[in-house]
Image (cartoon, grey):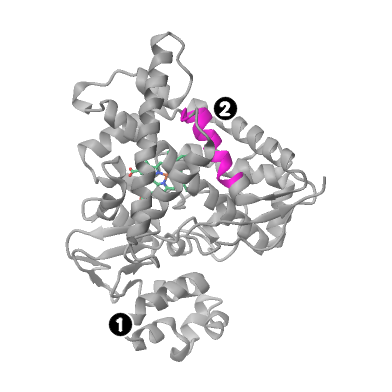
Amino acid sequence: MTAITENMDSAESLSEEKETTSFIKQFDLTPEAEQWPLVRQWMKDSPLPFYKELRAKRPALVTPECTLVTRFEDVTEILNQPTIFTVDLYKPKMGAYLMTEDDTHMHNTEKEIMLSLLRREDLPRIRNFVAETGNDILERAGDSIELVNQYGRLVPTLMVQNIFGLDGINPNKLIEWSYWNQYDAFRNQPFHESGNSASVHSKTKQANRMLGIYVGFLLLRKWWHIFRGKPKNDTVSRMLQEHYPKETKFNILRQGINAGGLLVGAVETTSEAVAHIFTQLTEHPDMFSKAIELAQQDDTEAFDKICWEALRFRPIAPYIFRKAAIDYTLGRGTETATTISKGSTVLNVIASAMFDPVAFEDPDRFNPERSYGKSFHFGFGSHECMGKIVGMMMIPEMVRQVLRRPGIKPVGPMKYLGKPFPEQYRFSWEK
Ligand code: HEM
């Protein structure tokens, strides 16, 4: 596909481009059974030119496995209609967690309660904790580190222990339980390479049995501190001390499930975001230098922007998936109107929507001053990330601490090692 990539540098070249080099043309000529694997490959190898062509010519691409939605306005239209485009695919993966429900009493009530416990006034404390913890790990590492396991997964886990309160356990256990849950829900669906593998699902169930036992004892321990008048200042302790109206049905079982959710949401997402930001800074060397310069400043506003811009070029996942509850026509009345059939899977390709000039000015340019604005890094609509304010502190601060090492540089590329999330990424610096 090199010829295609070279031909797709701008919207102008797109219109002049010969039909024979078109992704869509090639897609249409491919036997049905091979279409989705081909698309998946393009999403890996040449995402931006592929999405650019789709946005221009076939904004909703129907494949036998799923439909890709690529324009900003269509993605927001879908994510704004949670009862039509549902999170049903999460249901077999996440049990009875709030995230598996669309606009129900349980989803809306529990999300509001949890959001009220993740307080904005804690953010400076969270940022300081992340800065100090990150700095400590890097200092102890000497002059090099394997960024994913020794840092990317560890820092958010220590945050989950200290700030959210899931303490008293080896962090590696928390990392393992969180990993299987994220793998099963977000990388083990029928349209993924693993194809809804039963063994991944059973590993997750096993992990959740252990997580359930741990959380049970954790709540007892926290409750004991409260009973003795010495509550800890963490999210789980706060959750236990609040009084909830009966109508919320936020009983101790629901509280336990939500304590587990605080862990699962935080670790793999943060680790992946940090690794992806570094890949993009590395691919834009001038931005790598600029980020190093900004990392030295005390005011972090400009530094944070460069991180979100890097993540726009490689978000943690290229899409947010939903299931269509009815037949639904996108782009009704236009030349590209496409009907999405009831029951089909829709991939809302945020990696494309964040390059749509309708919403992002001069989208192909890495603009370090671009504000977070309409980015989808933490989702959009009623399922927007519950931990967004925490993630928006933690991720850039983790990147910043690394870039404050003198002579910091990657030692080789980020590697997956055959796994669904980044697994290895080495960095070194001068001591
Ligand atoms: C810091 C701890 C975190 C917690 C406790 C957390 C928790 C959650 C929860 C509960 C939801 C579902 C909300 C709902 O269904 O209404 C959610 C959604 C989401 N989170 Fe987080 N999250 C965290 C961090 C992150 C990070 C670091 C990222 C990425 C950089 C992220 C990306 C997302 C996205 C994209 C969604 C939307 C999923 C969808 O629409 O299907 N989260 N998060």
299 inside magenta stretch: no
Q: In the rendered view, does 131 fall on the left or right side of 249?
A: right
- Tell me, for residue 342, which label it has, or none: none
Query: Which residue is at a point 31% across and 65% down the rendered structure image?
Result: 190
Front of the two marks 1 and 2: 1
CB of mark 1 near ligand 1 (< 8 Å): no
Looking at the magenta stretch, what is its main secondary structure?
helix
Q: Which residues are magenta?
A: 151-166
**x and y, in percent, of residue 310 in the image:** 58, 56
Left-right relation of 280 to 98? right
Q: CA distance from mark 1 to mark 2?
A: 53 Å
Q: Residue 288, located in which quarter of the rendered image?
A: bottom right
Q: Work out which residue is located at the far top of the displayed protein and give it.
A: 229
Give the numbered dot on residue 32: 1
Mark 2 beta carbon near ligand 1 (under 8 Å): no
Where is 130 relative to 346, above or below?
Answer: above
The amino acid on which the numbered mark 2 sits, given as a three-letter code, is Arg
Q: Position of residue 44 (x, y in %)?
A: 49, 70
Q: Which numbered disc flags the more N-terminal residue, 1 or 2?
A: 1
| Residue bearing mark 2 | 125
Q: With respect to residue 54, does 352 lie above or below?
A: above
Task: Tell me which amino acid carries mark 1.
Answer: Glu
- Determine crowd level at label 1: few under 14, some 14-19, many 20+ residues with C-alpha closer than 10 A: few
Q: Visible in this render: residue 52?
A: no
